[in-house]
Amino acid sequence: METKVLHPDREDEIEYAGKLLREGNLVAIPTETVYGLAANALNGKAVKEIFAVKGRPSDNPLIVHISERDEILPLVKEVPEKAKRLMEAFWPGPLTIILKKTDIVPLETTGNLDTVAVRFPENEIARRVIKAAGVPLAAPSANLSGEPSPTEFKYVYEDLEGRVPAVIDGGDCAVGVESTVITLATEKPRLLRPGGITPEMIESVIGEIDIDKAVTEKMQQGAKVSSPGMKYKHYSPDCSIIIADVSFNEYVKLVNESDCDGALCFEGEEKYLTKKAVTYGKCYDGLSQAHRLFSALKELDEMGLKKVYARCPQKRGVGLAVYNRLIRSAGYSFYKNETKVIGLTGTTGSGKSTVCKELIDAGFSIIDCDKLTKSGIYEGECLEKLVNFFGKGIIDEKGELLRKNLAAAAFSTKENTLKLNEITHPYIMAKIKEEIENYKEKGARFIVLDAPTLFEAEADKLCTKIISVISDKELRLQRIIKRDGIDKALALKRISAQKDDSFYIERSDYVIKNDGDISALFESVQKAVAEITL
Ligand code: TXA
Ligand code: MG
């Protein structure tokens, strides 16, 4: 079969795609998530063809794509209130909603289920094609079954050339991982697949949802699955991937010193590695990781790599979607170390010490970085550099540090705070590393690095996981005034010298929001502890 490449800027070619689809043929189309292999969703025979071309098991249902909100109405028995709110908030966009189906949706499309998954894509080309076809389109990702989903035209063409009559060249996909799938056909809304619309975003619209176990864990053989797609091998390159659930520093050592032949790391990290590396987005940036992941998996094979260690994404925000895909690509294989270093940070006055006490109770060993810095940092070479910058006013006549004067000078402006950090951090880091080694020798399994400037000092590179404590600004203000016995103006100054909440949220595996409800605080700490010690 000859495969035509269609160009979306030509209206007649979009019309042609529509005609092909209406008449029961397949066309690969771009969407904002990944490319889809589309057919008329209401034509069982056409849909069967999708399964044949992809080599997809016939019990794995397809998503039905529409080009206006109201086009969902004939497909489902009822649109419940929560579905309406989600449609209002996130459609068009990368969210798929599952509801009870009507009889016009053939069982071929839904893999024999009485529910149907519906999505209103944001991508303009996709919407124009659906409109041109005049029917809703069933479209799974346009890869051969089991392989990474295609997010660039060249990969779709490579896979499908000769197998379908037409492929539309829509460039690169914006999101890069498939849509979020949520079912509202159950009593409580349940997330079946994470994607660009995060659980946090959904909960802000419809309240608490369940997250299916299969999102983050391997299903046991024979277990009942809510979404058939979860039980199949998926996103697998030929290269074998092992997710390194370790700190960045440990990762560099692992890649450079083990028998792997490459790495799947974040941008900028490759310069520390002595093996071939493919990057997938930036550290602490789930969106950019999602955008790159599937192409990066393809590139591992193109480079002929056989075994790579991958950096572990966060399980929060869009990171959850990245994590969900990567654990499948890796066949759930992880590399972990005996000892984990947990970074604990957050804005001043948020209640970090309370969280720290909880972690001590849980048996974690603590390195108090503030205390460390007070002993044996501000002397010799380091003190000399500080005097050079902040002036002689920070030392007494014996040449010893006047702490209050340094604090006043250093916290007076953002620039000065930065400078203080820049000067002292190398010395502090050396001390921290020494302490970690001491604890390791004593057999500690979980070591907490309690550090207000964890990221600024780049001590996050020593951490396996990071916990941040944040809190409402007004509450923090009261706490700081009381704790440090300072006035409001000075307290405000300290707060504004720090980064805002979003800085900590983006960079953390666990965010603990402390708004005064102590039992809620304990609960979120316990949750983090349970996962970390698993
Ligand atoms: O972003 C996307 O959703 C892309 C683009 C092309 O729109 N499509 C896509 O389709 O990812 P596919 O077939 O690769 O994934 C559909 C997922 C599968 O895991 C399937 O099991 C699940 O949705 N699914 C579909 N209908 C379902 C239903 N009625 N009940 C439970 N799960 C369903
Ligand atoms: Mg797929």
Image: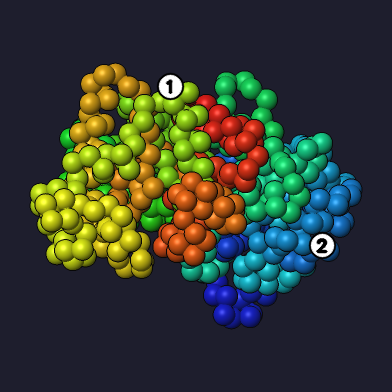
Residue drawn 62% across the image and 46% down it: 515
Residue 446 appears in the picture as rendered: yes
Between 105 and 75, the one lying in front of the other is 75
Residue at the top extreme, as displayed: 443
The Cα atoms of the two marked residues, 2 and 1, are separated by 56 Å
Type of amino acid at the residue the image marks with label 1: Gly
Q: Which residue: 34% across, 37% down?
A: 368
Q: Position of residue 5 (x, y in %)?
A: 51, 69
Left or right of 83? Residue 155 is left
Between discs 2 and 1, the one toward the N terminus = 2
436 vs 382, left or right, is: right
Classed neighbour count for the residue bearing mark 2: other residues with Cα under 10 Å, few (<14), some (14–19), many (≥20): some
Q: Tag 2, which secondary structure?
A: helix
Element under label 1?
Answer: loop
Residue 55 vs residue 120: left or right? Answer: left
Vertical placement of 400 versus 387: above or below? above
Is there any visible trace of residue 505 in the rendered image?
A: no
Which label is found at residue 198?
none
User: Which one is nearer the viewer's eye here, 176 or 359?
Assistant: 359
Residue at point 11%, 52% (across, down): 398
Q: Give residue 71's mark.
A: 2
Residue 267 location in percent, x, y? 32, 56
Which label was assigned to residue 363?
Answer: 1
Percent across and percent down for residue 427 are 19, 47
Q: Are marks 2 and 1 in contact (CB under 8 Å)?
A: no
